[in-house]
Amino acid sequence: MFKKSVMKKIFLCALAVTLLFSCSKELDIAPPNSITDEQIRKLLESGDEKKIQAVLGGMANNMPKLVNFGALSSESRYGSNQGFDVMRNLEGNDIVFGNRLLNIFGSDEYNLLDFISDASDKNTPYWNYAWNMVNTANKMLNYLNPETVGTNKKLQEYKGRGLILRAYAYNYLMENYQNAYQQGGKAKLGMPLYDTYSPVQESKARSTADETYAFIKNDINEAIRLFKEAGIGFTTDPSDFDLGVAYFMQAKVSLWTGDWNTTISASNEILTKYPTLMSQATYGATNKGTQTAPEMRPEQNGFLNITINPEVLFGFALGEAVTVHNWWMNPFAEGNGGIGQGFQRIDNRLYAKIDNRDYRMGCFMASDWGDYTYPTNGDKRTIPMYTNLKFAATHGLGSDDKKNVGRVSCYYMRSSEVLLMKAEAQAQNKDDQSAKQTLNTLLAARTKVGQTTLTCDNYTSMQGLSTLEMVQFQTRLELWGEGGREFYNNKRWNIAVGRAGSATHVDKSTYPVSKMTLQIPLDEMLYNNKMVQN
């Protein structure tokens, strides 16, 4: 686990300070250094919402924010969850990094150099990120046993948040540190399962993959039950852990493990509440200027401004949002993805398959763009063909200063992905007709205004594909550049990296699925004598 004893000491000190000095008079608790777990539980069992909020409110409110995390290190690649995701984006087929060989952050990942070995600095941050979430969730869940929670709606809500965070973290560990469940992972080891936190807790051995996924699913199912009993449905605040987030996790984990019926039912729960998809007007950047002097306002881009995106289940507003993803993906940002010339481009092989009636084609430059002037030093860059405009903006939200280009919101879950998960589960379930109907909903929403509505039957490049291949193609296109999804789907679909046939890829490497599973980090192997290496 992640620095278990140190983290526990920090937590105990912080909790003691919060309880004893901020709330001692209000809660009428024991003097400093005398509070016990029993006293804390009595405060919680009192049913007094004010006391419950004072004791656990801060921790519970912090649960969703740990997903949106940006303080693991000073290096942007591995200093935030979004940095992790962008690095995963580069380890696939569909994203091209620049238009020449580069020696900047991201080039090692794009060139598919070692990122899986136990001593790699590109490995451990993923482990630490996930275990930090597990530990933090368990610290709060320690106080929320069934007897304490009872039927108290506030405690049910708080426990649900902790369970969702723990499930999210364990699923993240399995995505990275084990083969995909249906590609050999089912017969392999999962993770050590910790459902409590203690400074003297012994390290545990790895459970089986089946046991790990059963643990994850139980957390999700219990969270759904608790949210329902607490009256927590689909809330209007996108930064909440609510019923929508719980069902999203249920659909995702069920898809990974081949439980197609649960994927479909969980997806339906969400799509009933989120029936509206993004329109052409808000899907990516709209240029109101020229190529050399573009004006792309993030206010009109649903990927950068979640307030206009009807698909967002889980995300964070300006000020709360981690914005590393935008700095890397936005060609007009003064970071490695823009002025550093690490332009995030689409592979020409995928671009060529986009139907001319599909407005997503406009999310990528059809030709080189002439010199763009970056504001700080007046440096100019020619932005190459195929660079994405999906995440592009020349200004920040609410700003006329181009130096504020990074001022955006962010999202982690949206309903288009849910629709694609449902379609895949239907295709995997041999229900081709239903899968095509589900895909047709997405295709209709992605048809250019004034064009014949796209369907599975008339989408040019989808002719001759199996229904599952149709879903896979649309998933690659719809989720391009989002959350490292291609990397994880390639693991799940058993699709190797193969760039030799690409005209745009600078690095022409191949990379097998068997090397997409990270080794357990060296520090963990040394710390936990029960740990077994992959």
Image: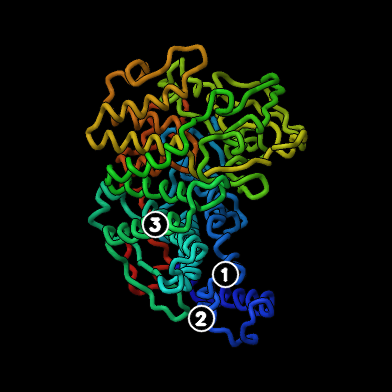
Q: Is residue 534 left or right of residue 505?
A: left
Q: How far apart are marks 2 and 3 (CA)?
A: 26 Å
Q: Nearer the viewer, mark 2 or mark 3?
A: 3
Q: Under tag 3, what secondary structure?
A: helix
Crowding around mark 1 (Cα neighbors within 10 Å: few <14, some 14 to 19, many 20+) is many
Task: Count up the numbered dots.
Answer: 3
Q: Nearer the viewer, residue 244 or 411?
A: 244
Q: Which of marks 2 and 3 is nearer the N terminus?
A: 2
Question: Which circle's residue, 2 or 1, is located before the other in the chain?
Answer: 2
Depicted 517 relative to depicted 202: above or below: above
Label 1: element kind: helix
Residue 360 shows up from this direction: yes
What amino acid does circle 3 point to? Answer: Arg
Circle 1 residue: 52
- Pinpoint residue 446: horizontal percent, then vertical percent: 47, 23
The residue that appears at 45% across and 34% down in the rendered structure is: 416
